[in-house]
Amino acid sequence: RAVFTQYYKLTGPPFLVTPDHRFFFGSQTHQKALAYLNFGLLQGEGFIIVTGDVGAGKTTIVGHLLAQLDSSKYFAAKVVTTQLEADDTLRMVASAFGIQQEGVDKASLLRRLERFLIDNQNRGRRVLLLIDEAQNLPWRSLEELRMLSNFQVNEKASLQFYLLGQPQFRQTLAHENLEQLRQRVIASHHLAPMEREETRAYIEHRLGHVGWKDDPHFADEAFDKIYDNTGGVPRRLNTLCTGPLPDTLPPIDVE
């Protein structure tokens, strides 16, 4: 990839599959999701949920939002989940906030979390917790998160949650024991694939971030073929546009 970017005089790879909020592209569905996220942020409480297929851009859009927050006013942490049971989920949350949790019983850990939330609120900072791959959490773990949302300081919620998950996460949320959590969801959006006409703008947007000057050049019909083979899913687009290196790239002189 270094040879590719050097040959085309790019400052970096434009189509990495790893989420990177610096490449955020405001397609119609992503702009709508961002509006819901901002609405949730203004409410200052509860759960904000974003679902979407693998590679739809869930992590990127939330990363874009968090990157704009004033760190003196917000403390944000992220947890990427696996199949965690309730107590393990609590410990992962504490670890994300930098709270010592090894060798501590649950009651003591909850007190430490509460102290952490109080300290931040006294400093004028709101605490946000981003849970990625939320579809991996069993309902008992989600209920543990719901219990954490009960923490209040001066009658204000001291912790707000962003839950990101694949479409099946909505089935988990429908569990009969999660009624109270559902009542605390204040904003929710499902990320759809991009529209066909947005494909070109997305590709040119990412290339533009790394100094692209229409080299390599894309024929107009190429964008339709790219869409036909990716369905407008960002990660599929990135994978296809990265592709294998062509055999025809000439050698590059390195001084």
Image (cartoon, rainbow, N blue to C red):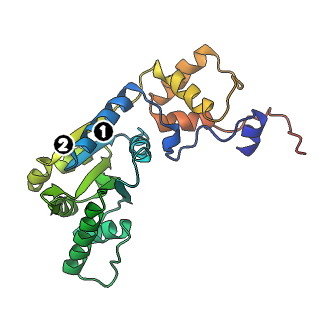
* Of the pair 46 and 140, the residue shown nearer to us: 46
Q: Marks 1 and 2: which is nearer the front?
A: 1
Q: In which quarter of the image is residue 62?
A: top left
Tell me if 163 is positioned left or right of 144 in this view. Answer: right
Q: Residue at x 31, y 63 (%)?
A: 83
Residue 85 appears in the picture as rendered: no
Q: Residue at x 67, y 32 (%)?
A: 211
Residue 53 rendering spot, x and y as whole percentages: 36, 40
Identify the mark at residue 66; answer none if there is no mark: none
Q: Quadrant of the N terminus?
A: top right
User: Reading the chain from its start, which is encountered first: label 1 or label 2?
Assistant: 1
Q: Which residue is drawn at 41% across and 54% down?
A: 71
Residue 8 rendering spot, x and y as whole percentages: 75, 32
Tell me if 5 is positioned left or right of 86 in this view. Answer: right
| 151 over 1 or under it: above or below | below
Q: Mark 2 points at which residue?
A: 186
Residue 226 rendering spot, x and y as whole percentages: 54, 25
Tell me if 24 is positioned left or right of 151 in this view. Answer: right
Q: Look at label 1 and name its amino acid.
A: Asn
Q: Look at label 2 and name its amino acid.
A: Ile
* Of the pair 87 and 68, the residue shown nearer to us: 68
Identify the mark at residue 38; answer none if there is no mark: 1
